[in-house]
Amino acid sequence: MAKAKVWNTPNILTLFRIFLIPFIVVVLLTKFQFEEWFSLNRETIAIILILIASITDVLDGYIARKRKQVTTLGQLLDPIADKLLVSSVLISLVDMRLAPAYLVVIIIGREFAVTGIRMVAAMHQIAIPAGSLGKVKMAFEVIAMCLIIWGNQSDFKIILDIGTIALYIVAFVAIVSLVEYLIIFIRKVELFKEDLE
């Protein structure tokens, strides 16, 4: 019975998202002529894989809530899968010289900071749910990454500029959402102390 609960559709979708990440990185960073294999350039293939991964992110949460299949494993793996996807693609874009390194440091740094806040909160048995800004940030991240990748073609440089602007928005939202998490954490810790007293 335990296996049936853990290996449900939402968790399989999350694992599939993690499984896609190395393929996305390989497509972005390898100099093979993908056109000869798939009749598609590497930018198109990378975007398709990122969008598939993003769709699984939406689906696993929706199915888990609808079918009441929320598990501890799922709650652990889902944010890890999101962070791995975003971090891997953004670091690849820095390596390709398509994204400013300092923006990527801000965005990934925020992920580490939020994870740290949640770990400290968990030690005090305080749950901090994902904020609304965090979800907005994830959507903007996917849009920005896809635009930047698509703009890595001679005829689409303006799209690269739009994607870079979107990445600045992501960095701004990342900072604001980090502040949101800090405020929630401080308030919950204060309430926790009041309950102990």
Image: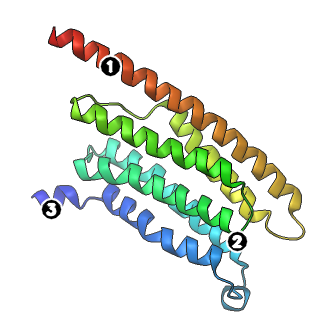
Q: Nearer the viewer, mark 3 or mark 1?
A: 1
Residue at horizontal 62 percent and vertical 35 percent from the top: 173
Where residue 180 appears, as percent x and y from the top left, is 50, 25
**Residue toward you, 47 or 172:** 172
Instruction: Tell me the residue that label 3 is attached to.
Output: 3
**Residue 27 drawn above or below residue 78:** below
- Identify the element where label 2 is drawn: helix
Q: Name the residue under label 2.
A: 44
Q: Distance between the residues labelled 3 and 1?
A: 34 Å
> In front here: 75 or 178?
178
Residue 26 x %, y %: 57, 77
Residue 47 appears anywhere in the view: no
Image position of 67 with respect to 181: above or below: below
Q: Distance between the residues labelled 3 and 2?
A: 37 Å
Quadrant in the picture for the N terminus? bottom left
Q: Earlier in the sequence, mark 3 or mark 2?
A: 3
> Amino acid type of disc 3?
Lys
For badge 2, the amino acid type reads: Thr
Q: Which residue is drawn at 56% across and 45% down?
A: 138
Q: Residue 188 carries which label?
A: 1
Quadrant position of the C terminus in the picture: top left
Near-viewer residue (145 or 103) = 103
Question: Could you classify mark 2 by the number of other residues whose Cα lies within 10 Å: few (under 14), some (14-19), or many (20 or more)?
Answer: some
Which one is earlier in the sequence, the residue at label 2 or at label 1?
2
Residue at image position (21%, 30%) is 125
Q: Measured from the top left, where is residue 88 in percent x and y? A: 54, 63
Q: Distance between the residues labelled 2 and 1?
A: 44 Å
Where 111 sits versus 82, above or below?
Answer: above
